[in-house]
Amino acid sequence: MTKILVYSLPSLPLAALYFSLYVLLGNFYFNKFSLSLSAIGVSFILVRLFDAFSDPVMGYVSDNFYTRFGRRKPWVILGGCIFVYAAWMLLVPDPDAEIGMVYFACWLLISAIGWTIMYSPYYALGAELSSDYSERSKITFCRELLVLLGILLASLLYSISFELDTNLFIFDIRPSVGLKQICLTSGVLFLLSMIFFLLSRGFGRDIHDHKNQKFEIQEIIEVLRSQRLFSRLLISQFLNGLANGFPPALFVFFVNYLLQLPALVGPLLILYFVGAIIGVPFWLLLSQKYDKHRLWCAAMIYACIVFFFVILLNRGDLVGFSIICFLTGLALSADLALPTSIQADVLDLEVLRTGKRPSGQFFAIWGFVSKSAVAVSTGLALILLDLVGFQPNIYNGAFALTFLSFMYGGIPIILKCFSVYLMWNFELDRKRHQEIMNSLQSKEAI
């Protein structure tokens, strides 16, 4: 369990910063620097699509370039450092600098480059920690638990400050203060996690595969064409990623403008991610008893039921939205961990089929799909808000607020229903995966 924890530690500070960039940053630049929502949305889409398209290249690099520290670790450390620095420049901009769209887009791009360098090697390393069907669920749930703790930490730091002069906690702090606290705390935690990560010896032993030395787009296309299960999983993940991208992108706007409770953004985020953390042991226990694809479908259906009640909310409905935040949070931990665990199982099927283990490229394709979904949904949400005439710090009218409510709760329901349709009869269950592992072990014994 120690090696799983050491592997998962970097997830906490990186998730805190990633959450801040893609949930809190848009509203910050919209209100403080008067950047248009459409411009911010387009920047998110373009930068994150660039990030997604570069993932397969990084997957190839981490699969085929060896160092004394292994194939994965150096890239995780390098990419993480670039990402943390770029996040600081975005979240704590120099007051003397000229802050506009060029500044915003350039540092957003640099942060995406750092994330790309880190993402594929890090997730590929997680898939290589174990080949056991149930153990992989433990790895992904532990990693995603640290992700949720990081987001929870960011939510706390965004809403609460400690005054040294009076030794009192201060609530309802300015967004700029909260974002600075997030950066400082995450930077320190990232440095500490990298020390443990670099010095660890319990994982990172490379699975050398000299058959996988060429990077050809045609090979990736062939994998998608021949791996029917992988393609179906990717489409389902893309649809669910679209569904999951709308609520975070609109959360601050929903609380500020529809509920008109801006002081409670931080506490409501905390409630949401507390629900997600509580859900981790619940879904982990169920994943030991039930097939992962059916469990994921059950989580998505449950989320759809809860999201339906969003459209019934009006100004000041704090209790109702608090309940929704907590209940949808319970489903989030399943969304984060189960699809990635299923993807690692599909990788074993690819090894059996071809004799190759292209972990980095598999997770690069996965990263491309996941990031593309979030890029499209995050950017599109902001662009659509701008098109209906959304303006900062004013009442935006019944039509705009109803449209905001539909995007927050209605669109995710529609997309998740399609995702459930694709995954309900997914053929790679526990029994089939055990057969694959037995076949692989038989081949290795020959």
Image: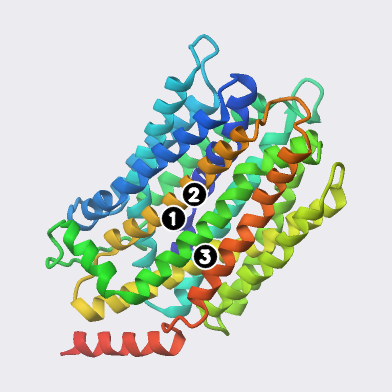
Residue indicated by mark 2: 374
Residue indicated by mark 1: 370
The answer to whether residue 20 of the structure is visible from this angle is no
Label 3 and label 1: CA atoms lie apart by 13 Å
Mark 3 belongs to which amino acid?
Ala
Dot 1 crowding, Cα within 10 Å, few <14, some 14–19, many 20+: many
Nearer to us in this view, 98 or 383 = 383
Query: Does 81 appear above or below 355?
Result: above
Asked if marks 3 and 1 touch (Cβ < 8 Å), the reply is no
Direction top: furthest residue: 96
Nearer to us in this view, 404 or 137 = 404
Asked if marks 3 and 2 touch (Cβ < 8 Å), the reply is no
Coloring basis for residues? rainbow
Dot 3 crowding, Cα within 10 Å, few <14, some 14–19, many 20+: many
Asked if marks 1 and 2 touch (Cβ < 8 Å), the reply is yes
In the picture, the disc for residue 249 is none
Q: Is residue 260 left or right of residue 36?
A: right
Mark 1 belongs to which amino acid?
Ser
Point out the tag, 3 or 2, that comes first from the N-terminus.
Answer: 3
Quarter of the picture holding the C terminus: bottom left
Element type at mark 1: helix
In the picture, the disc for residue 337 is 3
Percent coordinates x, y for residue 328 in the rendering: 69, 60
Percent coordinates x, y for residue 348 in the rendering: 31, 76
Query: Does 180 appear above or below 213?
Result: above
Name the residue located 68 percent from the left edge and 70 percent from the top edge. 302
Mark 2 belongs to which amino acid?
Val
